[in-house]
Image (cartoon, grey):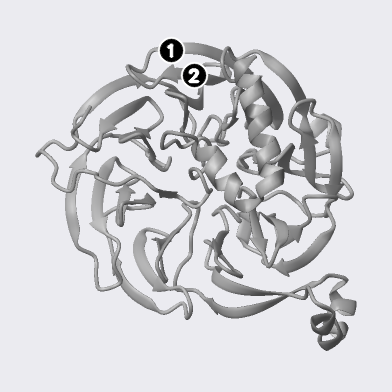
Amino acid sequence: MEDRACALLRRFATVLFGTWYLVGSVLSAKAEWPQWRGPNRDGVSNEVGLLKVWPANGPKVLWKVPIGEGFSGISVSQERVYTMFSKGDDEFVVCLDATDGGEIWRFRSDKNYHEGQGGNGPRATPTIDGDLLFTISAHGKLYALNAGNGHTIWSHDLQQKFGSKMPRWGFSTSPLVDGELLLVEVGGKGEKSIVAFHTNTGDVIWSSHKDKLGYSSPIAITVKGVRQIICFTGTQLVSVSPTDGTIYWKYPWKTGYDVNAATPIFIPPDKVFISSGYGKGAAMLGMRVFVSPDDERTARVQIRENQSKIRVEEIWKSRKLKNHFASSVLHGNHLYGFDNSILKCIEANTGEEQWKTRGFGKGTVMLADGYLIILSDRGKLGLAKATPSGYTEKASAKVLSGLCWTVPTLANGKLYVRNEKEMVCLDMTGKH
């Protein structure tokens, strides 16, 4: 009951205080990582005091546990660790103790997803909101589970209920909580590309947009007081109102095989960055919101054309940064991310390349304490200062083997990394 009361209080405060509270609520008292790409869905941690000098064999291993196939990210909340994997014929959601990796519960979420080219197993990352856990199986089963014991609260089969078409490489999007709404890229038939569910009941509040599924996950942003849900669908970037699904704007972005996979990045106060692989590249979009009568009179033509009070303009477009599946991170005025298998830094305002380096393959990157934490696709962990002046590695170590396509998670000084066989918890502060 106490967990439920806390969850309801957080949701009330989200409505009352808007964006600021959304950031603060997911963090709670401790530095947590309760969803895809962390507290703000941007791959950035607010933790400081990380080790800048590592032992020869890398940061201390606190524990390691066997898991199965899949590329689901790792969420951490209230000293519990959540992810997904598959073994044999089954797919699972699992909850572990952050102290020692001991299994607390396991929930069978679906049959195993087999895909010879991209790899087997689940792709989505669990989203934790108080005592609720939301996630999607690789075959498209949407679940709300009790985060404490793994019991089902409600569920939907997206293919059966909405006519969602199975993406070529499986359902990969991670659900987004915004107040009492759960926003999911469903890819259903008709105007059911994006669906808002009530977090407690699973009831459909609204559905919107018409497009096939991509592989990205939605984000929530506020520009000039206007709340928007930004979704990178199969062929477009689209902004909708969380209130009723009204489409504010669309930006066409057709990529080979519909692999729009990297999460959009909000650059305050009014820009959004997107990037895709398969030779597509990246773009920076600027938003102008018309909120006053003078604004509306000045821009009445644009408003009439777009049927929206938001106008979107392309600031730049470039092929210098092509995120295949790993999302980039923003630090200061610069973006750091993988151009296929080359790690690069580009200037956010212009898209101009600042530096590039190899050696991580098709790796993943996150940001903490002003440093890039990079995991190669073969298990090399690297630490480098996030600076446009050049790539300078401060530390590196081999921490995993095999295929590593899951971005690291940092919570309470512990770094969680995984491959398709095991999860490893590393001490990044020297205090554990």
Left or right of residue 300, residue 146 in this image? left
- The picture quadrant where one finds residue 153 is top right
* Residue 136 visible in the shown view: no
At label 2, the amino acid type is Cys
- Percent of width and height locating residue 93: 55, 21
Residue at x 64% of width, y 28% of height: 7
| Vertical placement of residue 164 versus 79, above or below | below
Viewer-side residue, 56 vs 321 = 56
SS state under label 1? strand
* Residue 287 visible in the shown view: yes
Between the C-alphas of marks 1 and 2, the distance is 6 Å
Specify few, some or many for label 2: CA neighbours under 10 Å numbering under 14, 14-19, or 20 or more: many
- Percent of width and height locating residue 320: 44, 73
Identify the residue position indicated by label 1 in the image. 103
- The picture quadrant where one finds residue 101 is top left
Quarter of the picture containing the N terminus is top right
Viewer-side residue, 355 vs 60 = 60
Identify the residue position indicated by label 2 in the image. 95
